[in-house]
Amino acid sequence: MDTRVGSARDPAFLRAVRPILELYASYFRPEVRGFERLPQGGPFLVVGNHSGGQTPPDLPVLLTAWWRERGVDEPVYALFHSFFLGLPRVGPLMERAGAVEAGRDAAEAILRGGGILIDYPGGDYEVFRPWWERNRIEFGDRLGFVRLALRTQVPIVPAVSVGAHETVIVLARGERVAKRLGFDRMFRIKVWPLVLGPPLGIVPGGIPTWPLPAKITVELCEPIDWSSRYGPEASEDEVIVRRCYEELTNTMQATLDRLAAERRFPILG
């Protein structure tokens, strides 16, 4: 692995902060299934649906369960928007926990070095989808993760979560507002949503709300290995990339539909 990428990850730091993150995750009555389906080691790419608005709990729920099952020493990294990693004090702490700035070179370095990479391709577009679309996979036709898996010839493990998007009520994405304010040019932020949550009621997406205590369930699905069908050159073939994208999103949507059908009521689970 490129020693400059992910070098800040600190297992000792993770051991120290794990009890705090475990306490936070426990608020959501977490359940993570399917660890027996994971490859024994990296490299592989974990692709999840992103949910929960300003403070998405899906990654802490997944990681705390991962550390319990497989330990903190396993080289697990997660892609983050440059905006968050650029925040004073916050960014360096996230990097010690395994956060890596989203980008082609960094992602490839992690995987080619034998690491495990978690990616939420839907990003801000998906994490702020409206409440009535909470049980939909919405990656917004972002295909980069497919090309990444094909180029590096690693399997993808779909990580499908339900409930995280019931911790906040998103009323609107606010794509037009973000564009008019120039956030897409200044910060690469393409939404400026309107959300409903305690204690302030309806607020713009930049203001945190207290998350509702929804039960969160995450299912790790069977790995999808396109390298058995396609070589690295397929990453440049738009037809193949689109076919792989639809295969993965259809698989994840079917899993999400099943998980959502298990819930009798929103928030209560």
Image: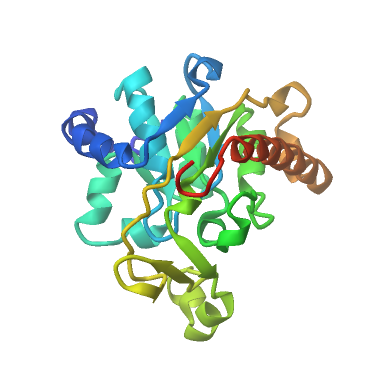
| Residue at figure coordinates x 64%, y 28% from the top left | 153
Q: Position of residue 181 (x, y in %)?
A: 47, 84
Is residue 75 visible to the viewer in this orientation of the structure?
A: no
Quadrant in which the N terminus appears: top left
Q: Position of residue 195 (x, y in %)?
A: 45, 69
Residue 70 is drawn in which quadrant? top left
Q: Position of residue 53 (x, y in %)?
A: 44, 59
Q: From the viewer's perspective, is residue 92 above or below residue 71?
A: below
Does residue 67 appear left or right of residue 103 in this picture? left
Q: Which residue is at the front of the view, 253 or 71?
A: 253
| Residue at figure coordinates x 24%, y 50% from the top left | 92
Q: From the viewer's perspective, is residue 141 above or below residue 205?
A: above
Is residue 37 visible to the viewer in this orientation of the structure?
A: yes
| Residue at figure coordinates x 70%, y 33% from the top left | 232
The residue sitting at the front extreme is 264
Q: Which residue is at the front of the view, 32 or 236?
A: 32
Does residue 147 appear left or right of residue 78 in this picture? right
| Residue at figure coordinates x 68%, y 25% from the top left | 225
Does residue 194 appear left or right of residue 261 in this picture? left
Indicate how the structure is coloured in the image: rainbow
Q: Which residue is at the front of the view, 73 or 130?
A: 130
Q: Position of residue 45 (x, y in %)?
A: 54, 33
